[in-house]
Amino acid sequence: MFFKRFFLRCVPLGMAILTASGAYAKPVPVFAAEVSPIPPEIAAQMQQYTWHEGCPVGLDQLAYLRLSYWGFDEKPHHGELIVNKKLATEVVGIFKALYAQHFLIERMQLMDVFKGDDDAAMAVNNTSAFNCRDITNKPGQFSLHSYGVAVDINTMINPYVKGDQVLPEGGRKYLDRKKLVPGMIVKDGFVYNIFTRRGWHWGGDWETRQDYQHFEKPEVVK
Ligand SMILES: [Zn+2]
């Protein structure tokens, strides 16, 4: 039942909306989401780049999501995301809420596109979730991305900062978190609220480092 493919629609596709002045507004592109088990072709590429025997969750514990998002070109796009299946419906709800707020996302591609290389994905401001890899700066310890219970959003605009280290390097431009730009996540802002209201934790709140791109919900697997 959970894995039955489904679409969420706010209004029928292409429905024109009558404004107060009586004029027809342009149709608002609706949010759409699709949830399924990992398709075989995606599973094959994951076994090449982002998943291997010994990873903490199996491919059957993950879900493949296709989601609408607003691009930096202010147009709707469909992105791909892989998350723990226990969080699939919740993540759809989160991205539906981000879409309703017209939050801009530069790109949403699977980590396999970057051969599992987090630096390469961050350098182009990618948004992603699952990747069976170590914690940044902690080799040998599985990151929560390895369980599909962490999401990184607009990774250049929202960099990882530990002392002088800024990842990706291009993220240095965005260290002043009061200089707001589209796609930025800030404390108590609507992106922060959409996640934390559902019990997710934000990496920007951490004391020893700030991982502004990162939200996690480890409670579902620990
Ligand atoms: Zn992360």
Image (cartoon, rainbow, N blue to C red):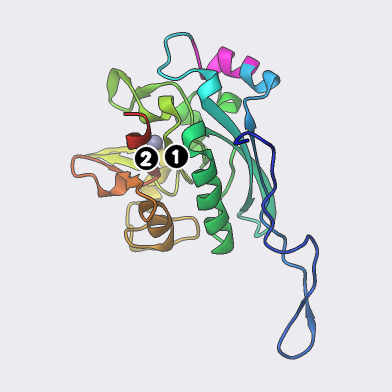
From the viewer's side, name the closer residue of 74 and 140: 140
Give the SS element for disc 2: strand
Mark 2 vs ligand 1: CB under 8 Å?
A: yes
Q: Amino acid at mark 1?
A: Val
At 64% across and 32% down in the image, what residue appears?
Answer: 36
* Farthest residue, direction top: 53
Give the SS element for disc 1: strand
At 47% across and 38% down in the image, what residue appears?
Answer: 87
Whether residue 110 is visible: no
Contact (Cβ within 8 Å) of mark 1 with mark 2: yes
Apparent side of residue 17 relative to residue 128 in the rendered image (left or right): right
The crowd level at tag 2 (other Cα within 10 Å; few <14, some 14-19, many 20+) is many
Q: Which residue is label 1 attached to?
A: 151
Q: Which residue is label 2 attached to?
A: 216
Quadrant into which the N terminus falls: top right
Q: Position of residue 61 (x, y in %)?
A: 51, 24
Q: Position of residue 91 (x, y in %)?
A: 51, 44
Q: Position of residue 175 (x, y in %)?
A: 33, 51
Apparent side of residue 8 relative to residue 26 in the rendered image (left or right): left
The crowd level at tag 1 (other Cα within 10 Å; few <14, some 14-19, many 20+) is many
Q: Specify the segment rendered in magenta.
A: 44-52
